[in-house]
Structures are given as structure tokens and as C-alpha cells.
Amino acid sequence: MQVNARQDTLVGSELSLSTNRCAWDNEHWDGKYRVFYCDSPWEYRAKVKGRGTVTRHYPTLSIEQLKRFQVKAITAKDSVLFMWITPPLLPEAFEVIKAWDFKFKTKAFVWVKTTKRSGRWHWGTGYFTRANTEDCFIAVRGKGLERLSKGVHQVIDMDDTLIAPVGAHSVKPLEARVRIVELFGDVPRIELFAREVVPGWHGHGLDYPGEGIEIGFSDEVETG
């Protein structure tokens, strides 16, 4: 019951965009974003007691709720989406990408995790083998965006070790945002379900410290 109550709070709340000013946020901007960066609060089907359940850290959204999220209302005709996915929900992730009117292209980033203290490999529990890496997919809408750099690598690295340390639960490495800007430039961009203010980005989310317009949920999944 507690989980459902938190879900209702998330769906009914005023989810806001940052009022953080960016170079592209001026009178010429049409209010549509060209880059979306997203780490969705996925709701897992399996409820495994004591095995890293995400609801202990933040409220989650069901796949149907995510599909009804009105991203299309603030999306430019030609744009790109970077979405962190979780392998147990891979088919559902493709459903969300399609519902947001994007088309999957390929894997953008692979995050190879290490521990903060020792720098050794970080091992999760996993449902079969013990997991380490996380993947970020890229999808496009319309023609997408022109690639400005051919030097952006897939593996998230820090200090040339090809690895990045694990932070707080579900927090992704800042390096991903840096590479996105290197890849597509200083265009209107937003992080969905963000939990911190990042210079040059607008942000959205229940735990985001900014204020601004709402992103609502449609009554049904939009098609076409």
C-alpha cells in the first residue's frame, strides 16, 4: 500500500522543469527540446525481498504510466533520446521509446562499474549471473540530429581506466552528459527524472530542485 501511495503522489504532483538559464534558453527558443536524457524510475515485476528493491530509494512508475508520460508535447520534430535501460525490462523499454514517438537506433553508452573504495569491479546481485554494466540506448525522432564529433566513445571511462565508480543508488555518471553535448552540441536539452541541477541542462523530476512547467500524463497512450 505504501508503494502505491507513493506512485499516486508522483503521478499527481507538479513535475517541474528547471528555471536554470542556459545559452540556448532565450527568446528565439520555441520551447521544444532536441535532446532528452532519461533514467526512468522503472517498476520491476518481480518483488524479491531484500535484494536491492528500488522502492526503498524512490517512487517508481509502471510501464503504462511511463508510456502515458507526455514527452511528445515538448519534443522537437528532429530530436534524440538517451535512455538508461535495465535488462529485465528490455521489451518494456522499447514500448516506452515507441510511445514517446522515438525510434530505437543503437546502444549509446556502456557503464562499467567499480567500487568507490577499492576500485575493483562492482558486482550486483542479478537474477542469474551477477551484474555489473548498465546500458544507455539512443533513439531518434524525425531526422535526429547531426553528429558533431566522431570521437565520442561508447564505454564510460574515467582517468583512462574504462570504468567509472558507483555513486548513490541509480545515480549515473556525469560523464554521460558531457559526451552527449560533445556529440550533438549546445542544443536545447533536458534530463527527465533528474535529481540534481546540471549547468546547461533543464531538468525535470519529483526530486529535482527547480520550478517550472508541468509535464503531465495523458489518459491513454498516444499513437501516431
Image (cartoon, rainbow, N blue to C red):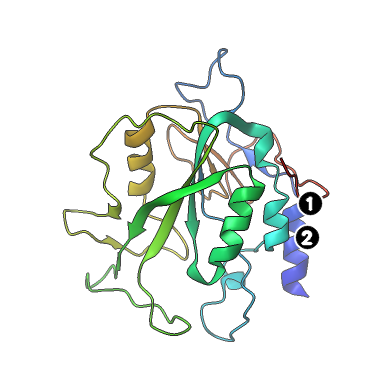
Q: Is residue 51 above or below residue 174?
A: below
Residue that sits furthest to the top in the current view: 27
| Cβ atoms under marks 1 and 2 closer than 8 Å | yes
Q: Quadrant of residue 10?
A: bottom right
Q: Is residue 41 visible?
A: no
Q: Percent position (x, y) of residue 201?
A: 47, 35
Q: Say left or right for 199 vs 42.
A: left
Query: Between residues 73 and 17, which one lies in front from this camera angle?
Result: 73
| Residue in the image at 73% along x and 50% along y | 68
Residue 49 percent coordinates (x, y): 59, 86
As drawn, the label of residue 8 is 2
Amino acid, disc 1: Gly
Q: Along the line of sight, which residue is nearer the eye, 68 or 196?
A: 68
Which residue is found at the position 50% from the left and 31% from the top? 143
Horizontally, residue 160 falls left or right of residue 122, namely: left
Q: Residue at x 34, y 60 (%)?
A: 111
Amino acid type, callout 2: Asp
The residue located at (37%, 29%) in the rendering is 185
Task: Give the class, few, some or many, for how many residues have Cα within 10 Å of label 1's Cα (few <14, many ≥20).
Answer: few
Q: Regarding mark 2 in the picture, which secondary structure is present there? A: helix
For mark 1, give the secondary structure. Answer: helix
